[in-house]
Amino acid sequence: MNDVKQLQDIATQVRRDIIRMIFASQSGHPGGSLGCADFMTVLYFNVMNASPQTFTTDGKNQDMFFLSNGHIAPVWYSVLARAGYFDVNELGTLRKLHSKLQGHPTNYVRGVRIASGSLGQGLSVACGAAVAKKMNSDTNIVFTLHGDGELQEGQIWEAAMFAAAKKLDNLIATVDYNGQQIDGTVDNVLSLGDLPAKFIAFGWEVIQLNGNDIAELIDGFAKAKSFVGKGKPIIILMKTEMGQGVDFMMGTHKWHGKAPSEEQTRQALAQLPETLGDY
């Protein structure tokens, strides 16, 4: 268990990793990766009952995590490496030929259970895992992360209906609610309307929080866990800022899938002090 300052330091290094990885490959998705660095740090270093030593593909007797919006793989790779799932020096191979660290996650990477990137599928997979845990009398939790633009996919709502109908109260889903997607704002592309009301209507327990505030994330996860076993799936609607931590990447969809130049990389890294040591 890490305190808030330790988690903030890890999240800062993760953001630094993201910028360096994507610059080196000149390909990748910095915006959403930067925005979810705090969430992923808290999840892996404070919340989940999981470790590199106990990791198994089937996830028995441990918490499980599925990244549905797989294009933000850089943040997951950095967190996995910093948590000890593989050598941090491997981060320098992002999107390179023959690298395990492809643009979207695959289960060649230790810590990854499914390939993801075709949006809308992760909640269905998580429902299957949650059902299996109940059948096996496994009391651990299934966690997921989704983009808000991803919620425009119909399969999400089929899975949401299934989770409530089957009382999957061992499932904690999270939405990166940054209001941006590749083609513009979520409201302009296809508005989600009153998202909390939608999930309440679908039979979910809903928590809303600031996903860029580590203390609030810790409290929010504790609240989410308090609902486990009480008959409803749980969703955390997490307000974040795309590009969080790098001022010129924040508040716009334009850094959804764009690599920084050398000068932009220098500017970004100047805002992200090295805390754990670069790879």
Image: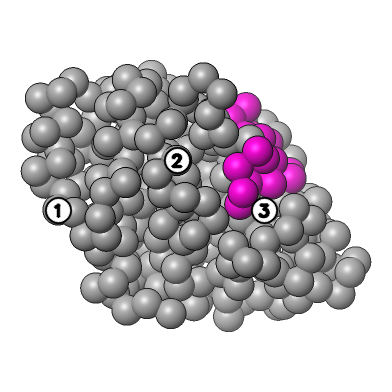
State left or right for residue 94 relative to residue 109.
left
Query: Is disc 1 surrounded by few (<14), some (14 to 19) or many (20+) residues within 10 Å?
Result: some
Q: Residue at x 37, y 77 (%)?
A: 2
State left or right for residue 175 relative to residue 225.
left
Could you tell me how far apart the alpha carbons at marks 3 and 2 are, in whole angstroms?
42 Å
Give the residues drawn in magenta, as a range: 107-125
Q: Residue at x 41, y 57 (%)?
A: 82
Q: Residue furthest right?
A: 135
- Residue 265 appears in the rendering: yes
Query: Is disc 3 surrounded by few (<14), some (14 to 19) or many (20+) residues within 10 Å?
Result: some
Residue 164 or residue 267, whichever sits in front: 267
| Mark 3: secondary structure | loop
Residue 146 or residue 184, whichever sits in front: 146
First in residue order: circle 3 vs circle 1: 3
Foreground tag (2 vs 1): 2
Residue identified by numbered label 1 = 273
| Mark 2: secondary structure | helix
Residue identified by numbered label 3 = 202
Mark 3: amino acid: Phe
Could you tell me how far apart the alpha carbons at marks 2 and 1 are, in whole angstroms?
21 Å
Mark 2: amino acid: Glu
Residue identified by numbered label 2 = 90
Mark number displayed over residue 207: none
State left or right for residue 60 relative to residue 27.
right
In the image, residue 242 sits, relative to residue 81, either above or below, namely: above
